[in-house]
Amino acid sequence: VWVFTYVGALFNGLTLLQLAPISLFTIPLLNEKHQVEIDHSCEPESQKYTGKCPKLNPGMKRKPQPLKSSYTV
């Protein structure tokens, strides 16, 4: 929440409203244009987390957990 204080001190509300659509269209275009460089620079960072978080590594599958039944036969 304190981040909004610093952002508000730097920018006016109308300025943020003008920057929102500009960034909405510019960031995906820049990402598309420089995808190779972005992937190359993010690769070392992604290698740190591949074993720690299975959601970041889609190739890693969890072991199926046995179902616990609430009744006994």
Image (cartoon, rainbow, N blue to C red):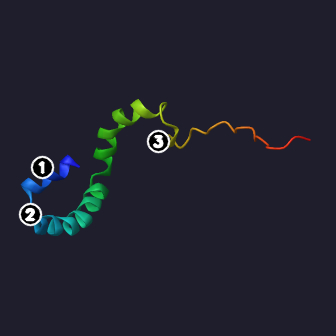
Residue 67 location (% of width, % of height):
75, 41
Q: Is residue 55 left or right of residue 39?
A: right
Please tell me how crowded label 1 is: few (under 14), some (14-19), or many (20+) other residues with Cα within 10 Å. few
Q: Earlier in the sequence, mark 2 or mark 1?
A: 1
- For residue 71, above or below residue 12: above
As displayed, is residue 2 above or below residue 60?
Answer: below
Q: Secondary structure at mark 2?
A: loop
Local SS, label 1: helix
Between the C-alphas of marks 3 and 2, the distance is 36 Å
Viewer-nearest of discs 1 and 3: 1
Residue lying furthest front = 71
Mark 1 to mark 3 CA distance (whole Å): 31 Å
Foreground: 12 or 30? Answer: 12
- Report which residue position mark 2 lands on: 12
Q: Which mark is residue 56?
A: 3
Where does label 1 land, which residue? 6
Give the x, y percent position of residue 36. 32, 47
Q: Which residue type carries mark 2?
A: Asn
Q: Secondary structure at mark 3?
A: helix
